[in-house]
Image (cartoon, rainbow, N blue to C red):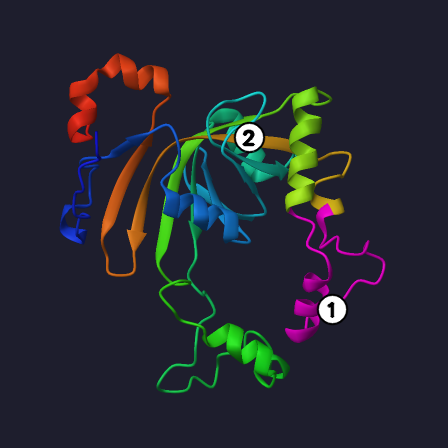
């Protein structure tokens, strides 16, 4: 039966989940965003304050070890986020496809340092990249909630996930070109196309973290929001056809 289309919530009604979309897969726009974004923000929490980390990641709709959508990341075992995860595996992720470089303001701020550096602004390629503001690239942000676990060290699952993560974060010559454009120092000792991946993925002390996606929220540039929930097909059947007719739990 065709899915009932519901208008997105506005900001006044977004404090709680309303009419979440139920599916065994991620919404297409969230999946597209995860496939195209370079980084995401990972929020963990101890008993006091949230802790936010900028992370390289790999999204997979499923693995040989988990039929549900997952996100692979790596972490140092002694890091703040790892210690938080041991005590509280519930996490939130934020990924977006908005161009995040802050453009110059109407009134120049003499105390603001250029970012990227001045030499980047003189590049036609950099200017193009920094000033792109189309609906295709500036459409949504997605908050993703899930449960994280540290994969057993030395296991087949760890080796498999680490290999997929390395494949997804090895970028070829484009990384070196971007570093030159934006003034970042290039490391001639790094393997060709490595992009630093050998350090944060293949290091001996690195642990592989897997986040099982549970639910989330899409926010668009107009302030509209839409909630969604991941439910395995067998659990959807248990909920009965009446629930799926109107698309709410």
Prevalent SS, magenta region? loop
Query: Measured from the top left, where is residue 81 in percent x and y?
Result: 54, 38
Magenta highlight on residue 189: yes
Residue at (23%, 35%) from the top-left corner?
20
- Tell me which corner region of the image, top left, top right, bottom left or bottom right, holds residue 209: top right
Crowding at label 1, few (<14), some or many (≥20) Cα neighbours within 10 Å? few
> In the rendered view, does 16 fall on the left or right side of 93?
left
Q: CA distance from mark 2 to mark 1?
A: 32 Å
In the depicted structure, whether residue 123 falls above or below residue 83: below
Q: In the rendered structure, are the residues bearing label 2 and label 1 in contact, judged by CB atoms less than 8 Å apart?
A: no
Which marked residue is nearer to the observer: mark 2 or mark 1?
A: 2
- Tell me which corner region of the image, top left, top right, bottom left or bottom right, holds residue 243: top left
Is residue 164 something one can see in this rendering? yes
Residue at (46%, 76%) from the top-left corner?
131
In the depicted structure, whether residue 142 falls above or below residue 182: above
Is residue 249 something one can see in this rendering? no
Query: Measured from the top left, where is residue 204 in percent x and y?
Result: 78, 34
Query: Measured from the top left, where is residue 237 in percent x and y?
Result: 28, 15
**Which residue has dot 1 on it?**
185
**Which residue has dot 2 on it?**
210
Report the magenta residues as a range: 169-197
């Amino acid at each position: 039966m065709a899915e009932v289309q519901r208008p997105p919530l506005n900001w006044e009604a977004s404090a709680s989940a309303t009419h979440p979309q139920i599916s065994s897969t991620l919404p297409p726009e969230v999946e597209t965003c995860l496939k195209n974004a370079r980084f995401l923000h990972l929020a963990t929490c101890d008993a006091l304050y949230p802790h936010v980390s900028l992370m390289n990641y790999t999204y997979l709709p499923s693995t040989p070890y988990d039929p549900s959508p997952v996100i692979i990341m790596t972490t140092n075992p002694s890091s703040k986020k790892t210690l938080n995860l041991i005590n509280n595996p519930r996490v939130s992720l934020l990924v977006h496809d908005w161009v995040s470089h802050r453009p110059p303001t109407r009134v120049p701020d003499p105390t603001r340092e250029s970012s990227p550096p001045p030499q980047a602004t003189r590049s036609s390629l950099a200017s193009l990249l920094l000033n792109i503001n189309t609906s295709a690239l500036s459409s949504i942000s997605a908050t993703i909630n899930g449960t994280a676990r540290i994969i057993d060290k030395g296991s087949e699952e760890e080796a498999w996930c680490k290999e997929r993560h390395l494949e997804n974060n090895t970028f070829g010559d484009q990384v070196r070109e971007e570093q030159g454009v934006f003034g970042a120092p290039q490391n001639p000792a790094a393997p060709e196309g490595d992009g630093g991946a050998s350090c944060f993925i293949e290091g001996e002390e690195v642990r592989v973290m897997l986040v099982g996606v549970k639910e989330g929220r899409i926010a668009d540039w107009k302030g509209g929001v839409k909630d969604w929930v991941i439910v395995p097909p067998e659990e959807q059947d248990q909920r009965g056809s009446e629930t799926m007719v109107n698309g709410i739990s």
